[in-house]
Image: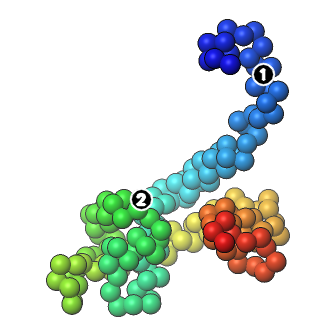
C-alpha cells in the first residue's frame, strides 16, 4: 500500500483501528505522559529552591559520593548519577555559579578537578530532597503496596536486575 493510497482512502481511520494499535493506549505513550506529569510536579516542588531536578540529582549524587570517598571528579559524578558527561559539565557550571558546589584541583592529578558541596549546597539539597520525597509519596500513592513491583518493572525495562527475588530476569541476561 502506497502512502498516497492511505491518504486518499476514505477508510484510513478504520484501517488504523483494524491494526489494533492506538497511540494513547501504547505503554510508551503512557510512560511518556506519566513522565511529563511527574516532571511537572518535580519542577513545582523545586521552584522555591531555585534548582531543577537534574541539579538536585547531581547535588544528591555528590553528597552520596563524598561519603564514600574524599574527592569526586565530574566524570565520577556523571557515572554515579548515570548522566551524560557533557550535560553534567553544563549543570556543574550552573551549580558553581549558584555557589552550591565548589571545584578545586585534584591533589594527585593537577589536570583534574574535584567537586564538593558548599554549606548552602548541603542545605538546599537536604530541603529539596525532603520536598522531592513528598512529591514521590503523593504521586505514587495510588500504587499503594505495588510500589516495589512497579520499581522492579522499571528496573527490568532499564536493563537492570530487579531487587526482589522471584522477579523476571533483566533484558541483559
Q: Determine the secondary structure under disc 1.
A: helix
Residue 162 image offset from top left, x and y in percent: 70, 74
Please state which of residues 127 and 75 is positioned toward the viewer in this rendering.
75
Residue 74 image offset from top left, x and y in percent: 33, 73
**Residue at coordinates 69% horizontally, 58% vertically from top-left?**
139
Would you name the residue on which mark 2 appears? 50
Where 167 falls versus 69 (above or below)?
Answer: above
Of marks 1 and 2, the one in the foreground = 1
Please state which of residues 40 and 164 is positioned toward the viewer in this rendering.
164
Which callout, 1 or 2, points at the residue further toward the start of the chain?
1
Residue 85 image offset from top left, x and y in percent: 36, 65
Spatial distance from mark 1 to mark 2, Cα to Cα? 49 Å
**Residue at coordinates 67% horizontally, 43% vertically from top-left?**
29
Would you name the residue on which mark 1 appears? 15
Q: Give the position of the C terminus as an image quadrant.
A: bottom right
Residue 107 visible in this rendered orientation of the protein: yes
Q: Give the position of the N terminus as an image quadrant.
A: top right
**Residue at coordinates 57% horizontally, 66% vertically from top-left?**
131
Q: Is residue 132 left or right of residue 100?
A: right
In the rendering, which numbered label is found on residue 28? Answer: none
Where 136 falls versus 165 (above or below)?
Answer: above
Q: Quadrant of residue 169?
A: bottom right
Mark 1 near mark 2, Cβ–Cβ under 8 Å?
no
Q: Quadrant of residue 25?
A: top right
Residue 125 visible in this rendered orientation of the protein: no
Residue 126 image offset from top left, x and y in percent: 49, 76
Q: Determine the secondary structure under disc 2.
A: loop
Amino acid at each position: 500500500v502506497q502512502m498516497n493510497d492511505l491518504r486518499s482512502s476514505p477508510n484510513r481511520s478504520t484501517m488504523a483501528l483494524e491494526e489494533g494499535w492506538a497511540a494513547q493506549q501504547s505503554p510508551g505513550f503512557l510512560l511518556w505522559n506519566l513522565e511529563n506529569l511527574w516532571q511537572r510536579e518535580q519542577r513545582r516542588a523545586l521552584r522555591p529552591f531555585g534548582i531543577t531536578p537534574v541539579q538536585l540529582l547531581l547535588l544528591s549524587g555528590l553528597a552520596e559520593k563524598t561519603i564514600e570517598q574524599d574527592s569526586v571528579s565530574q566524570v565520577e559524578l556523571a557515572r554515579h548519577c548515570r548522566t551524560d558527561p557533557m550535560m553534567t559539565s553544563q549543570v556543574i557550571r550552573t551549580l558553581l555559579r549558584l555557589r552550591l558546589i565548589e571545584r578545586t584541583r585534584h591533589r594527585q592529578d593537577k589536570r583534574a578537578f574535584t567537586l564538593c558541596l558548599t554549606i548552602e549546597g548541603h542545605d538546599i539539597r537536604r530541603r529539596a530532597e525532603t520536598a522531592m520525597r513528598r512529591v514521590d509519596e503523593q504521586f505514587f500513592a495510588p500504587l499503594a503496596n505495588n510500589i516495589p513491583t512497579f520499581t522492579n518493572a522499571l528496573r527490568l525495562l532499564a536493563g537492570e536486575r530487579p531487587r526482589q527475588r522471584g522477579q523476571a530476569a533483566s533484558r541483559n541476561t
